[in-house]
Image (cartoon, grey):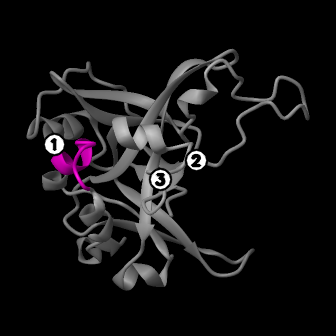
């Protein structure tokens, strides 16, 4: 899974802009990106998606809120009322996201990539868990496969949100967790960002040799 990640080191606007520009023009103005060694769900994070004239880089809420929540509150309007959004949506399973009501339309129409410098997993028993940090072996940025959506709520207003796709882990990564984020190389971007393309090979290609504990 991927419940925490990091935005430090090469996670700078210049680096992100340069990487994206090797594929298509970046049409968005620069974002103010602050380093964060402990990125958590529900925070606003940078995402990149392809539009007709190039990349749109935009901060969105980590934890997808589906379009069918339009007009409904993000948080309970009163304590205990239960009308807020309660689903845990910071990850979507590659095996099922195309068919679930929460992610189905986003998967079919709204794909994105999410830059990061590292992600984390924990092992051990409660109270004595050990935190493990994973980065690319070549020191480059990570690019998570994501899907995004857009809603207007009465309390939080209008905003975009995203989830990170995860798949079964593989190789030595499986010693730390049974699942891992789907991480794309630059040559994978075209396939992932084309909703008509078959992404199953990307989901299967964990390629654990790309990563190291750091």
Residue 195 on the magenta segment: yes
Q: Nearer the viewer, mark 1 or mark 2?
A: 2
Give the left or right position of residue 207, taking residue 166 as reference: left
Residue 107 in view here:
yes
Label 1 to label 2, Cα distance in Å? 28 Å
What is the number of callouts on the image?
3
Residue 34 position within the rendered picture, expressed as x and y whole percent measured from the top left: 42, 35
Q: Which quarter of the figure has residue 42?
A: top right
Residue 204 position within the rendered picture, expressed as x and y whole percent measured from the top left: 30, 70
> Label 1 neighbourhood size at 10 Å, few (<14), some (14-19), many (20+)?
some
- The reply to whether dot 1 and dot 2 touch (C-beta < 8 Å) is no
Give the left or right position of residue 11, taking residue 21 as reference: right
- Tag 1's secondary structure? helix
Q: Earlier in the sequence, mark 1 or mark 2?
A: 1
Residue furthest right in the image = 80
Using the image as rendered, state which of residue 13 and residue 171 is in the foreground.
171
> Which region of the structure is painted magenta?
189-198
- Tag 2's secondary structure? loop
Label 3 to label 1, Cα distance in Å? 28 Å
| Residue at the disc numbered 1 | 19
Residue 3 position within the rendered picture, expressed as x and y whole percent measured from the top left: 55, 57
> Label 2 neighbourhood size at 10 Å, few (<14), some (14-19), many (20+)?
some
Which residue is located at x 70 percent, y 78 percent? Answer: 128
Q: Looking at the rendering, in which quadrant would you find the C terminus?
A: bottom left
| Residue at the disc numbered 3 | 97
> Label 3 neighbourhood size at 10 Å, few (<14), some (14-19), many (20+)?
many
| Residue at the disc numbered 2 | 89
Q: Nearer the viewer, mark 3 or mark 1?
A: 3
Q: Earlier in the sequence, mark 2 or mark 3?
A: 2
- The reply to whether dot 2 and dot 3 touch (C-beta < 8 Å) is no
Which residue is located at x 55 percent, y 34 percent? Answer: 66
Which residue is located at x 50 percent, y 54 percent? Answer: 92
């Amino acid at each position: 899974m991927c419940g925490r990640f990091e935005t430090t080191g090469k996670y700078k606007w210049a680096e992100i802009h340069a990487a994206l520009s090797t594929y298509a023009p970046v049409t968005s103005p620069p974002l103010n990106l602050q380093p964060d060694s402990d990125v958590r769900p529900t925070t606003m994070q940078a995402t990149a998606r392809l539009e007709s004239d190039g990349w749109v880089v935009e901060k969105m809420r980590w934890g997808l809120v589906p379009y069918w929540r339009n007009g409904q509150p993000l948080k309970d309007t009163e304590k205990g009322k239960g009308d807020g959004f309660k689903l845990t949506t910071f990850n979507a399973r590659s095996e099922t996201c195309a068919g679930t009501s929460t992610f189905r339309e986003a998967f079919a129409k709204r794909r994105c990539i999410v830059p990061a410098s590292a992600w984390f997993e924990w092992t051990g028993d409660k109270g004595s868990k050990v935190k493990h940090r994973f980065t690319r072996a070549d020191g480059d940025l990570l690019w998570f496969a994501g899907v995004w959506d857009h809603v207007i709520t009465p309390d939080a207003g209008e905003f975009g949100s995203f989830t990170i796709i995860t798949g079964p882990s593989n190789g030595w990564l499986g010693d730390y967790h049974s699942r891992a984020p789907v991480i794309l190389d630059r040559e994978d971007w075209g396939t992932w960002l084309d909703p008509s393309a078959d992404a199953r090979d990307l989901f299967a290609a964990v390629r654990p040799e790309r990563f190291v504990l750091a």
